[in-house]
Amino acid sequence: MEQQITKTVLSVARKNEAIMTEETGLATSLEDEEVVRYTKEVLQKVMKKRARK
């Protein structure tokens, strides 16, 4: 499940990056590794919150 979510988030981030670059002419400095790290952090927080209920 975590891998699928990470894959989807990366895909969306890349598409948005392309759109933003096309519309603004500015490239993002966000790298795939940062997206993966942030996604894992969010998933951990969500799992902890679910475990508390």
Image (spheres, rainbow, N blue to C red):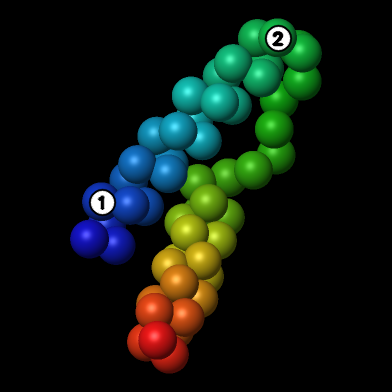
Q: Position of residue 49 (x, y in %)?
A: 47, 80
Which mark is on residue 53? none
Residue 37 visible in rendering: no
**Kind of residue sitting beneath label 1:** Gln
**Is label 2 in a helix, a strand or a loop?**
helix
What residue do we see at 56% from left, 26% from top?
Answer: 16
Q: Quadrant of residue 8?
A: top left
Residue at mark 1: 4
> In the picture provided, is 8 more to the left or to the right than 21?
left
Residue at mark 2: 23
> Is residue 7 shown above or below 21?
below
Q: Quadrant of residue 51?
A: bottom left
The mark that comes first in sequence, 1 or 2, is 1
**Is label 1 in a helix, a strand or a loop?**
helix
In the image, 29 versus 12, the foreground residue is 12
Residue 49 visible in rendering: yes
What residue do we see at 48% from left, 59% from top?
Answer: 39
Please tell me how crowded label 2 is: few (under 14), some (14-19), or many (20+) other residues with Cα within 10 Å: few
**Kind of residue sitting beneath label 2:** Glu
Q: Position of residue 53 (x, y in %)?
A: 40, 86
Q: Position of residue 47 (x, y in %)?
A: 39, 77
